[in-house]
Image: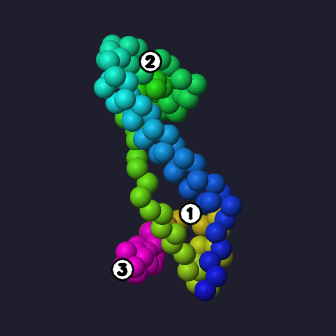
C-alpha cells in the first residue's frame, strides 16, 4: 500500500536527525578536548556563551550548553496513518466541542496501538 508522506514530515525528520547528530558531534569534541588537556574552565566558558535562539517561554537567549542538555537521540521514526471515517473531524473542521475532541483522542489511541505493535514486531 502506498503511503503519502508530506514534504514537511520529511524535512522535520531530517532536521531532527541532523540536530541530534550535531549534538553528538559536539559532545564527542568536548570529550576530545578534555582528554587532550584543554581545561574544563575553557570548555565551560565556550558552552556558557549565548546563542541566537531565544527560549519562547522565558524569552531569554539560550546558551550552547542548553543545546547539549536538551539532547534527544533519534533511533527510529514511525509514521502512523490516520483513518478518516465518514463522520470524522475532517468533515467537521471547525467543531471544537468537548465531545468531538474527546472522540478524536480516543480514536487516536485506538488507531495507533495496532500500528505501533505492527511496526515494533518487524
Q: Main secondary structure of the magenta part?
A: helix
Q: Which residue is mark 2?
A: 46
Image spot of residue 36 (x, y percent): 34, 22
- Quadrant the N terminus occupies: bottom right
Q: Quadrant of residue 93?
A: bottom right
**Residue 6 location (% of width, % of height):** 67, 65
Discs 3, 2 touching: Cβ within 8 Å: no
Q: Which residue lies at the image location 50% right of the left edge and 40% below the top edge?
A: 22
- Residue 115 in the image: x percent, y percent? 44, 78
Picture coordinates of residue 54, whole percent (x, y): 54, 28
Q: Is residue 60 visible?
A: no
> Which stretch appears magenta?
103-122
Q: State the residue at coordinates (40%, 50%).
A: 73
Q: Which mark is residue 96?
A: 1
Q: Are marks 3 and 1 in contact (CB under 8 Å)?
A: no
Which residue is identified by label 3?
121
Q: In front: mark 1 or mark 2?
A: 2
Answer with the quarter of the image where residue 105 lies. Answer: bottom left
Amino acid at each position: 500500500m502506498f503511503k503519502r508522506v508530506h514534504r514537511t514530515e520529511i524535512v522535520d525528520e531530517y532536521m531532527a536527525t541532523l540536530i541530534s547528530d550535531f549534538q553528538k558531534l559536539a559532545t564527542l569534541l568536548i570529550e576530545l578536548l578534555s582528554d587532550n588537556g584543554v581545561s574544563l574552565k575553557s570548555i565551560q566558558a565556550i558552552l556558557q556563551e549565548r546563542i541566537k535562539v531565544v527560549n519562547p517561554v522565558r524569552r531569554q537567549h539560550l546558551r550552547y550548553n542548553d543545546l547539549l542538555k536538551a539532547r534527544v537521540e533519534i533511533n527510529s521514526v514511525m509514521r502512523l496513518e490516520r483513518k478518516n471515517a465518514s463522520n470524522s473531524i475532517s468533515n467537521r473542521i471547525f467543531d471544537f466541542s468537548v465531545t468531538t475532541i474527546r472522540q478524536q483522542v480516543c480514536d487516536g489511541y485506538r488507531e495507533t496501538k495496532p500500528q505501533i505493535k505492527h511496526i515494533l514486531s518487524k
